[in-house]
Image (cartoon, grey):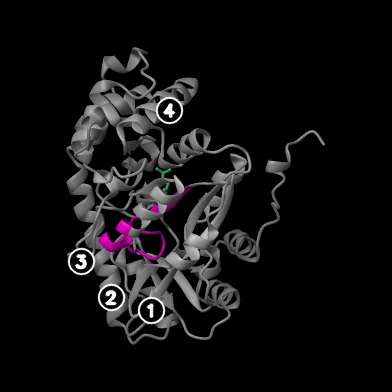
Amino acid sequence: MLFSKRTNWDRKPNALNQLMDELKLQGAAIVDLTESNPTRCAFAYPPEILQSLPDAKNLQYAPDSMGTLPAREAAGRFCRFDPRRTILTSSTSESYAYLFRLLLDPGDKVLVPRPGYPLFQFLLELNDAHYEHYPLVYDQGNWRIDFNRLERLIDGRTKAIIVVNPNNPTGSYVKAEELRRLSAVCRKHGLAIISDEVFFDYRLNDGPFVSLREHNDVLTFVLGGLSKSMGLPQMKLGWMLVNGPDGLVNEALARLEIIADTFLSVNTPAQNALAAWLAHAETMRTQILQRVKSNLECLTKSGVNVLSVEGGWYAVVHAGHIDEESFVLDTLRRHHILVHPGFFFDFELPGHLVLSLLPPQERFVKIISVLGGQDG
Ligand SMILES: Cc1ncc(COP(=O)(O)O)c(C=O)c1O
């Protein structure tokens, strides 16, 4: 076989993709409540974002493997973190790929949260890594890490634990007490922590919420980027903050520098513009947060069973004893509304649906009558 086994994916379209294709061919207008691309959700982007692009500096190529110093300083100021321990990448997905190359030999293992974000499977498989899910359990209106099960998954090949803070799609943050336990587990087994904080600033209540930025007990990587912080996925700029014991941090930075130097993937115009763009981060975050809050409020008030959500861009609905796949297909076929079934995110229990809270409210409310609420 010419091609690698790791790219031997089952590429047959699933039933949902097939139905979407059919409906698109028929010219149906689909209300897509899985939309997580903010540039398609009618936000008002400040026109100043484009002003830095014609700068003549953008015709000069003077690459710096970790990212140019002014851009790292801008990211560092934004994250309140030391720019010398900040590395720029072209996206959070790329940051993950660099970290898997840094930490894992083929066959080594990473623990990822479940329910969780489906991209991990591909990122890990592409890097010849194994993964196992540790459960987040929904208990009395709160998501918590099941530490007993997490610890049982750790073996001699385990290298790192990923936390998504707040998690996609459960919207749950890591609690201070959980961080203490996580830290103890990682110290005991010599593991690194990767904290994906792309949604950290989208807080839906007063917390308290802990970022792992300050966490230095064990080697810790905190990931973020423009894609979520400013709703600018197309600008392809992410950052990775490295914290922990000095010796490990210095070794990690030195190795990451070589990985990054191999690709030099962060484009120059985005780095040159970063400081100016980040000056508009709050404007964008405010707009996005307002949309997320008002869609969530509308869903909650309608009487639909929404699980508690602390942050991020998604809501999880528990729709009772439904067969998720039939419900989602039926909703698409009959109402032309697309939502995601919980099994896409590996929910342990059935009956869940995942909705993006980004779409404009006039589109978003269309789901409410389908879910059996009073409005819409
Ligand atoms: C939790 C989480 N991390 C990372 C990413 C990827 O972000 P980026 O666009 O920076 O690769 C996403 C995208 O949806 C996400 O939900």
Say what amino acid the circle numbered 2 marks. Answer: Cys
Q: Would you name the residue on which mark 1 appears?
A: 368
Say what amino acid the circle numbered 1 marks. Answer: Ile
- Vertical placement of residue 45 versus 367, above or below: above
Q: Would you name the residue on which mark 2 appears?
A: 298
Mark in the foreground, 4 or 3: 4
- Quick check: can you spot residue 266? no
Few, some or many residues within 10 Å of mark 3 (<14, 14–19, 20+): few
Say what secondary structure mark 3 lies in. Answer: loop
Mark in the foreground, 2 or 3: 3
Nearer to the camera, 332 or 79: 79
Return the x and y of residue 51 as percentages of the image width and height: 23, 29
Q: CA distance from mark 2 to mark 3?
A: 16 Å
Q: CA distance from mark 1 to mark 2?
A: 9 Å
Point out the tag, 1 or 2, that comes first from the N-terminus.
Answer: 2
Return the x and y of residue 355 as percentages of the image width and height: 41, 67
Quadrant of the drawing holding the N terminus: top right
Q: Is mark 3 within 8 Å of ligand 1?
A: no
Asked whether the residues under the numbered discs 1 and 2 touch, taking CB atoms below 8 Å apart as contact, a structural biologist would say: yes
- Vertical placement of residue 192 versus 340, above or below: above
Residue 162 among magenta residues: yes
Q: Would you name the residue on which mark 4 appears?
A: 256
Question: Which disc, if any, is residue 205?
Answer: 3
Outermost front residue: 188
Q: Is mark 4 within 8 Å of ligand 1?
A: no
Point out the tag, 2 or 4, that comes first from the N-terminus.
Answer: 4
What's the residue at 35%, 27% (across, down)?
250
Left or right of residue 316: residue 311: left
Say what amino acid the circle numbered 3 marks. Answer: Asn
Q: Which residues, given as a range, are shown in magenta?
A: 160-180
